[in-house]
Amino acid sequence: MSRKRKVGGAAAQHPEREIPSNESDRVEMFTDGVFAIAITLLVLDLPVPSSGSLPDVLMEKWPSFVAYLAAFLTIAGIWVHHHTVFERVARVEPAIVLLNLLLLLGVSLLPWPTALVAESIQNEAAHWNGIVACGLFALAALVVMISWSAMTALLSRRPHLLRRPHDAVWMRRSSIEAAVAGIPVLIAFATSFVNPVISLALYGAIPVYFLFSTSRRRPRSPVGPSGSGIHD
């Protein structure tokens, strides 16, 4: 009994101490593999001209390259932010794993609507096809954002899963950002009724903000010189 009290007292005296654990490594490695496959599939959809003037054919297929860039930036933004989150995660529970799988469902789905958007833009007569394709892109993005918001919100309420207790505040902020990000995604989809090209451009602009936002954040130092944690 006395030993348990000593352990509990030591933990209370050092709330900023980082929890040594590799339980989240497998989740992050599996996730990295899915991201790599999704980005590779995007490249496979880029056109390879077999005849005619190469510059003319490439200019004609410009929607494919714009769609590729939008999807690449989206997946890259999600991956960078995912890495930042799991830098702070020490342990995982089944609920976190399931929400992470839901996130990967949206990521792995992105190459398909990307190809559909590019094809519909090239066929200007099929305006409704472009709207449906942009809607599918928005659906995949919303699946990612909803699962992201839910996962980080859950982590913020379970600080025992985090490396440092004060990371719960960061998780709560990340959850709110992911939820708010759904608004510009819906706006981008709405613009597809006017022009799918505008919608595609907005889809590509949204993840740029998250890349910039994440790059400004640095991992928190576990303990500062005075014994208190250093916050961002």
Image: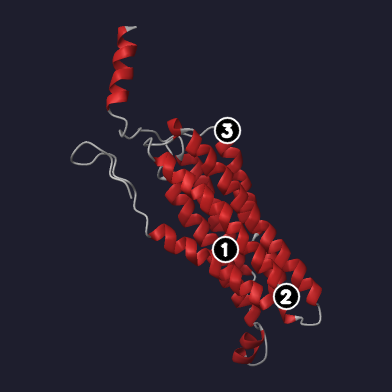
For the residue marked with disc 3, what is the amino acid? Pro
Inspect the image, locate mark 1, and give the three-letter code of the amino acid beneath it.
Answer: Thr
* The N terminus sits in image quarter: top left
Look at discs 1 and 2 and give the one toward the viewer: 2
Residue in view at x 54 percent, y 38 percent: 154
Q: Residue at 40% of width from left, 41% of height from top?
A: 167
Q: Is residue 53 visible?
A: yes
* CB atoms of marks 1 and 2 within 8 Å: no
Label 3–label 2 contact, CB within 8 A: no
Q: Nearer the viewer, mark 3 or mark 1?
A: 3
Residue in the image at 77% along x and 82% along y:
124
Q: Is residue 43 visible?
A: no
Q: Give how far across and how far down residue 108 sits, in percent.
A: 63, 55
Q: Residues within 10 Å of mark 2 (few under 14, many from 20)?
A: some
Would residue 37 be found to the left or right of residue 192 on screen? Answer: left
The residues bearing labels 3 and 2 have C-alpha atoms spaced at a distance of 39 Å
Query: Does residue 203 appear to the left or right of 226 in the view shown?
Result: right
SS label for mark 3: helix
- 10 Å crowding of disc 1: few (<14), some (14-19), many (20+): few
Q: Which residue corresponds to mark 1?
A: 40
Query: Looking at the image, which residue is at 61% across and 39% down?
Result: 98
| Rendered view: 174 above or below 13 | below
Residue beneath disc 2? 119
Dot 3 or dot 1: first in sequence order is 1
Please count the marks in the image. Answer: 3
Q: Mark 3 = which residue?
A: 94
The front one of 202 and 119 is 202
